[in-house]
Image (cartoon, grey):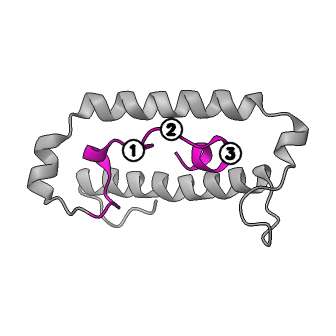
Amino acid sequence: MHIARICQGLDEDGIPPEYEVFGDTWIAADELRDLVEVDEVLDRAREVRRVSHEYIESLSDEQMHAAVGDPEDELTVAHWLMITSAHGALHIGRIQALCAMIEGDRERAC
């Protein structure tokens, strides 16, 4: 979603409303559990990953070095992709932490 918004824009929501946790509508955890289907989450994650990889691989060197976003930042597409990758690593760490909690090993480093 981050890559699409920065590099190509989106005509639709990057995250379907039922999975949006940063929106302006608070959904209680119990209600969220009833809304989310695990297979749908996994399918959505796979599709977003596939489309993102295809888009990144399609970029030319010139496009990768193009400045985008706030002109004062002068960040290129390559910069944004690196920032997005680092941000993604944070989420992977959270998934590892969840795994440790499920396994009952809260002290395990991510």
Could you tell me which secondary element the residue under label 3 belongs to? Answer: helix
Query: Alpha carbon of mark 1 to alpha carbon of mark 3: how far?
Result: 17 Å
Neighbourhood count class around disc 2 (C-alpha, 10 Å): few under 14, some 14–19, many 20 upward: few
Is residue 101 toward the left or the right of residue 47 in the image? left
Disc 2 designates what residue? 11
Q: Which of marks 1 and 3 is nearer the N terminus?
A: 3
Tell whether position 92 is magenta. no
Label 1, label 2: how far apart the Cα atoms are:
12 Å
Between the residue at mark 2 and the residue at mark 3, the CA separation in whole angstroms equals 13 Å
The residue depicted at 79 percent of the width and 62 percent of the height is: 75
Q: Position of residue 35 (x, y in %)?
A: 15, 41
Residue at screen point 29% across, 59% down:
105
Q: Do the residues labelled 1 and 2 touch (CB within 8 Å)?
A: no
Q: What element carries label 1?
A: loop
| Magenta stretch encompasses residue 11 | yes
**Front one among 10 and 99:** 10
Q: Position of residue 86 (x, y in %)?
A: 62, 57
Please state which amino acid type lies under the numbered disc 3.
Answer: Cys
Residue at (13%, 60%) from the top-left corner? 28
Numbered disc in front, either 1 or 2: 2
Query: Quadrant location of residue 100?
Result: bottom left
Q: Residue 15 carries which label?
A: 1
Q: Residue at x 48, y 51 (%)?
A: 92
> What is the x, y in percent for residue 107?
35, 67
Judged left or right of residue 52, residue 29 is left
The magenta segment is 1-24
Q: Residue furthest right?
A: 62
Say whether marks 2 and 3 touch (CB < 8 Å). Answer: no
Secondary element at tag 2? loop
- Mark seen at residue 7: 3
